[in-house]
Image: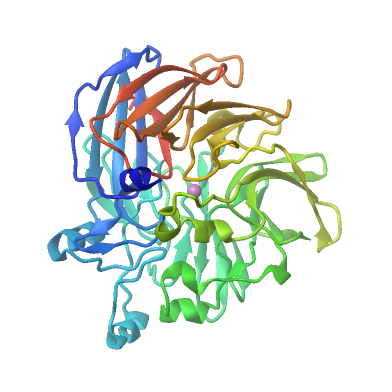
Amino acid sequence: MSNVFELGFGASDHEVALDSIPVRGRIPEWLNGTLLRNGPGSFTVGQQRYRHWFDGLAMLHKFSFQGGRVSYANKFLETQVYKAARETGQISYSEFATDPCRSLFGRAMAVFSPKISDNAKVSLAKIADQFVALAETPIQVHFDPHTLRSVGVSQYEPNPVGQMTTVHPQFDFAEDSVYNLVTRFHRVSHYRIYRMRGAGVPQLAASMPVSQPAYMHSFGMSRNYVILTEFPLVVNPLHLLLWLRPFIENFRWKPRRGTPFYVLNRHTGELVARFESDPFFAFHHVNAFEQGDELVVDIDAYPDNGILQAYYLQRLQDADAELPFGQLRRYRLPLKARKGTRVSYELLSDECLELPRFDYERLNMDGSYRYVYGVSLNKAQRNGFYNQIVKIDIQGRVAQRWYAEGCYPGEPVFVGAPGRTAEDEGVALSVVLDAANGRSFLLVLDAQSFTEIGRAELPHAVLFGYHGDYFNGV
Ligand code: CO
């Protein structure tokens, strides 16, 4: 994986804006919009290197489609973190698993005036007509989707010190609202659910005290409920507030806690149910919906937190290392059962799955949804990094795959064809690193046959990124 490692976890020094990039095959004419992606643009600053896949300086990428043609631009997100890196040639802010070397004095001072990273590199969304680069740290960076330039910042609470949020806000399109979880670390910590309606300010929808908060990268949402899946990767809030170690290394895996599900009514704020399950870990909830008296929670799960260890660059550098498999699990929570009832799961597929996507726009919170797309590991070639894309049919219990030797695809974003009648009528878009070529391309898959219909070629390699989305008409 050495060559792949250099290409996927190195540094980009190309910021370009190209009116047209070469297309092979065909790009559907109906594709008229922009795919925006967020992710690391560099894992090094001067002589220093970040330590983990979830570190790195944020970079935005933009692919715009019109009449079968594709334009492309990329730009480092304009942040204080980036500015400091540029000006000092050193890592000046703490990230997920990297802490700049600080004196004891600096560490003690950090309790009172921490430098909160604004390096919003993980995802992005359009919230109340604003494009926002999303981070787990509380500062969110607004940007112009045409120029990719920063236009401002926002946060959920006036004082963002000692908070963590998620990069996966949940949308209720019918209600024109969006929800997100903010974990507030304090002597008594809280999980707080915020709701934003239209262009309004965030309002507290629910709040729950917690003594040892968990690391939760996402949460579930159905028509009536918010589901907090409390993985037993937990922190003594004091350790985090004292910032003794890099952010994630303050959390401890405590499997004896199991993984409880907390179900909160998102309209009243009431905690309505709690369920127990065997310990597991996940980054991504996929979908959640109510079915009779049951709340169904689909989640991309791991037996433990080993996946977080596997994403350290030092581990990824080892060509023989195998990533743990993410599994698509279905938990059924019987809402009428007594508090603390134990629940188990059903495995929906034996394919490895990460960065899961589905037709969220139409089928979020809808139990009739059928197809989940994601990056995966080819079973015959499991070492290295994600090297195929899968489409899991959760009703038919079969999967389709796209695999090409030496190619490493990123998160596949499903874009539905206008007026579609079948759920999978449309395309899946993925930025693929072609290691032999030393460059990346945008792959356009027909989502039904799961075969390539075209690709648009980039002049450079794109580092392994996380999340993005497609915006029609932008
Ligand atoms: Co994520």
Left or right side of 307 for 198: left
**Number of callouts:** 0
- Write the residue at 21% across / 37% down: 147
Left or right side of 342 for 141: left
* Residue 205 appears in view: no
Residue 222 position in % (x across, y down): 66, 44
- Write the residue at 35% across / 51% down: 121
Residue 197 position in % (x across, y down): 48, 46
Left or right side of 266 for 196: left
Residue 61 position in % (x across, y down): 30, 38
* Residue 157 appears in view: yes
Q: Please identify the quadrant where the N terminus is shown.
A: top left
Relative to 411, residue 46 above or below: below
Relative to 474, residue 280 above or below: below
Location of residue 420 (image quadrant) = top right
Q: Residue furthest left?
A: 87
- Write the residue at 64% across / 62% down: 230
Q: Please identify the quadrant where the C terminus is shown.
A: top left
Relative to 181, residue 386 above or below: above
